[in-house]
Image: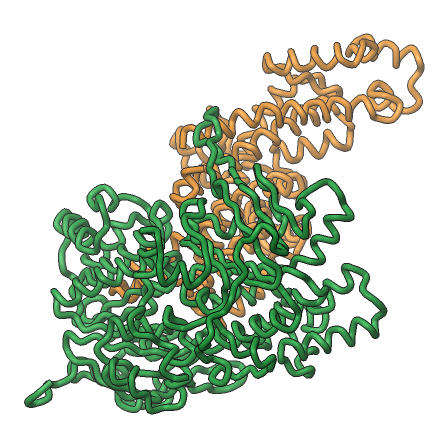
Amino acid sequence: MTGVQPQPLLSLRDLEVTFTTEHGAMKAVRGASFDVMAGETVAIVGESGSGKSTTAMAVIGLLAQNGRVSGGQILFDGTDVAALSGAGIARMRGSDIGMVPQDPMSNLNPVMRVGTQIVEALEDNGVARGEAARRRAVELLEEAGLPDAAHRASSYPHEFSGGMRQRALIAMGLSCRPRLLIADEPTSALDVTVQRTILDRLDVLTAELGTAVLLITHDLGLAAERASRIVVMYQGEVVEQGPATQLLTDPQHEYTRRLLAAAPSLASRRIQLAKQAGKTEAVADDLLAVSATPHDPAGPDADADNIIEVESITKVFKLRGRGLFSRSSDFTAVDDVSFVIPRGTTVAVVGESGSGKSTVARMMLDLIPATSGTIRFNGESVGGADRAAEVRFRRKVQPIFQDPYASLDPLYTIHRTIEEPLRAHDFGTAAERRDRVHQLMEDVALAPHLLRRYPAELSGGQRQRVAIARALALNPDLVVCDEAVSALDVIVQSQILHLLADLQHRLGLSYLFISHDLAVVRQIADRVCVMEKGRIVEQGTVDDVFDRPQQQYTRALLDAIPGRDLELGLRAG
Amino acid sequence: MVRLILQRLALLIPTLLGLSILLFLWVRALPGGPATALLGERATPEAVERINALYGFDRPLVEQYLTWMGQLLQGNFGASTRTAVPVLDEFLQRFPATIELTLLALLLAVGVGIPLGYVAARHQGRFLDHTTVAASLLGVTIPVFFLAFLLKYLFAVQLGWFPSTGRQSPSMLATHPTGFYVLDGLLTREWDAAWDALRHLVLPAVALGSIPLAIIARITRASVIEVQNADYVRTARAKGLRGPRLRRRVVLRNAMLPVATTIGLQVGLLLSGAVLTETVFSFNGIGSFLANAVFNLDYAVLQGFILFIAVVYALVNLAVDVSYGLIDPRMRVR
């Protein structure tokens, strides 16, 4: 930008947001200052709890009831929004400042037709009424890329897929042509390929309309790809801001550097250091390094020592018919899938939602039976009638799930949580169990004083460490990680991935790693199976599949990863 | 929607069949058999035999059941063993009174409970909210019969604002084409008769409706508070919705889902509560009749009434499910 600096559309000056909680006042945003020019896209990047969403909500005047702007100014076109009355800011919402929220599943009114929800926005902001508003709503949906918009406008949200809902929300956010659009993690709940088309659409629309965008995201790659400037927030403060390219190539603040280092990308290589050195450091920076010698994954050799051999398993679900007497129909979730897991290695199964990868995980855990085909564990067939074999199997195969909030019993202490599988399998005396729990805590690098706490008192990363400790309690051979790091912030994610790699090395574990995130898979897996619509479309070593993908679908998945050309995770090393 | 209704009506058949078998066996399992139950423990063997022959208790069970079912299907619910009046006649005569009473009680519970819960939620954590929560807790804990006595003593005996017993003052000499006294008064333009019948209804309806009112208020409050914080409400505000339109279109409609279920459940409670309320206020509905039948072990009456109440209950639940489909489009596909 040259010449005279134009007036910014949005200007935050020392913004402070305070939440009143039972434990007193808590400052969620402390002295945040940045500008957004008209038509410009600015991204706020940070981990959960960094205050990025709170900042955005303060701009549009939708802070939670116990939150308030306690200092500074939010200048929108010269007016201090923070000083406006409730009715004053309400008049600006929709017409001047629009919003596209995070979760498409929970942000549409479930009892109202999608078209009507846009019509009411148009009517309440005085843009159009009646028949004109209805026609306009259809146009807006079309514009947001919703196929068959005229017909779809009279559908209810539950009849839409996640991607379609997000398009509806984009149409809604832009319906009254706001000058500023707040996009709060607009696609983080969607598959990468869908994410990409939606973001492309949003880019085109805002460029055409000259809308400024304040993009909130935890994904540095996505921010760099979509925004011209990036604001990095950490613990309520803006720690660094600048042009996207400059921030990525020459990060000034320590936190930005760590964020860059932890960001998984296709350019990263398998976590190796821990394996070579056999150390157990948990600091991401030290552990993240590029291995000079490529890892040597064992191929699917017939003679090899395979812990798991999956042979053409198929899972067919019966779908209930709609009518009173109509037949149920079949849905093939997993179709003729075969792969092996060589002992001591990690095999990843990747795919988008609905690809059948989680069904594979559930069959591997013997939680649901396969319709046909066999799974052999240590040469023994899984899912037989033999009760003793089943107990043996359950002991040796342990799961780690995605959501550490939901998969830990909130009423159990951490000690009880980790001890639970030991008790269930009658492991030793109380004293022996206590020793084992302490050993496990050490293994996952958690301080013993946490043992008396409850899950709600731990952070997300700590909880996932507890889940790992619980999974390891019975000395399993195979751990099934179902999206085990997907809910974590990048830095924590990177730490957990290193922990998993280290534990694998020390304990000789084998992993089945289910994930939608190809960049993460690249870091942890030896072999990868790409699933689409229930079938494995491609499998091979990670390097083969990622560097020389054979299938169109695999290429599409790889292309859709935000910031794939940015080579994140390399520079910091 | 039509399919749902048909499906649910079809489900009624096995339900009622099962219930009829249970009821049938229950009467046969009475100590000493139904005849002894009828005549008392000091009945002579001859008398017992005569009754057995009269009512067919000496036939094989299957035959007895089929005979009974055949009669039921023809609308013959048997006759009272005390008064020999056909159950159906007695029932049709008293039913309007109970309907009138439960309807008014329900109207009161819904009409006051929902606004009360809504207002409490809007004032969450403040005085009005605390008062409502405390009052509704009180409402749930006071037994119906105690509240009935209390109301009667205070407002009928001491203050004399409302009549204490019956459905209508005998002095009214009103005509009753339908049996619904308030409606009758309106139809025949006997305004004073309608007003009098309504005054008779007030205290029983308040007593009967108090618990459902408290429960509905609490559920509404909790539901509104939850919906107020929902993501889609925030999004609706973000797109510029505000004021009554936001509250009516987005908050209230979504908050009504659990309330609809609750109302359906309360109807069952109202029917059982009517027995107590009608007894206290000498209100001539099926409730007081049923109470008498229990004391007299009038099994024919009990059988008929229990079957009838089961049907009413099932139909009310169906109505709730249908209303659920009307409020929530997600329920329609099922």
Residue at far left of view: A3
For this rendering, which residue is in front, A427 or A45? A427
Q: Which residue is rendered at x = 22% and y = 66% of the image?
A: A94
In the rendered image, the vertical position of residue A359 relative to residue A193, given as above or below:
above
In the rendered structure, the colour chosen for chain B is orange
Q: Quadrant of residue A31?
A: bottom left
Q: Where does the image place residue A562, in percent across and percent down from the top left?
A: 31, 67
Is A567 left or right of A459, judged from the image as shown?
left
Q: Is residue B45 shown to the viewer in this render? A: yes
Judge by depth and name the residue closer to the eye, A473 or A286: A286
Residue in the picture at 28% in, 69% down: A183
Q: Look at the picture and state if A530 lies above or below B303.
A: below
In the depicted view, which residue is nearer to us: B72 or A422?
A: A422
* Place of residue A315 in the rendered image (x, y in percent of width and height, measured from the top left): 53, 40
Q: Is residue B130 above or below residue B318?
A: below
For the question of whether residue B248 can be seen, the reply is no
Q: Which chain is green?
A: A
Residue B209, x across and y down, in percent: 56, 48
Coloring applied to the structure: by chain
Q: Position of residue A20 (x, y in %)?
A: 46, 82
Residue found at the very far front of the displayed protein: A303
Which sits in the foreground, A308 or A319?
Answer: A308
Q: Is residue B205 left or right of residue B298?
A: left
The quarter of the image holding the N terminus of chain A is: bottom left
